[in-house]
Amino acid sequence: MYEVFNVGKTILLDGQPLSLVTPAGVEGWIEKGIPHSYRYDQVRDPLDGKMKYRCIYEKEGAEVPFVLVNDPDEGDGRVILFDGKPDQPPVFHQLR
């Protein structure tokens, strides 16, 4: 599964909906040579109430940005949150 689109509760960024992408989906973009960029924003973790960072991807040709989530086939499908702002893109093999 490369791209998971949220059909239940909508995740918003600046009032606009986000699509979901798994680490495997981003790896697929890289393998296919699809241009994309990433950035981090800060959100409150609903589980512990602390401010954390999430990774937002923009893919060439897509109108809606993507938020990085765990693969629902292998985990809980939740948005991946980081305690500190990473200096580089997430290392996908370390997230699994």
Image: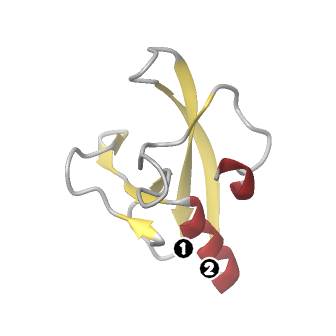
The residue positioned 65% from the left and 70% from the top of the image is: 27
Answer with left or right where residue 40 lies relative to residue 50: right
**Whether residue 90 is situated above or below residue 49 in the rendered picture:** below
| Residue 31 visible | yes
Judging depth in this view, the residue of 63 and 89 nearest the camera is: 89
Q: Position of residue 28 (x, y in %)?
A: 60, 76
State the separation of the CA atoms marked 1 and 2.
Answer: 7 Å
State the mark number for residue 34.
2
- Find the residue positioned furthest to the right: 87
Quarter of the image for residue 5 reads bottom left
Nearest to the eye among marks 1 and 2: give it: 2
Q: Which residue is mark 1?
A: 60
Circles 1, 2 touching at the beta carbon (< 8 Å)? yes
Q: Amino acid at mark 1?
A: Glu
Label 1: which secondary element? loop
Q: Position of residue 22 (x, y in %)?
A: 51, 60
Q: Amino acid at mark 2?
A: Ile
State the mark number for residue 80.
none
Judging depth in this view, the residue of 75 and 68 nearest the camera is: 75
Q: Position of residue 63 (x, y in %)?
A: 39, 67
The residue positioned 19% from the left and 50% from the top of the image is: 8
Quarter of the image for residue 4 reads bottom left
Q: Position of residue 32 (x, y in %)?
A: 64, 85
Crowding around mark 2 (Cα neighbors within 10 Å: few <14, some 14 to 19, many 20+) is few
How many numbered circles does the render carry? 2
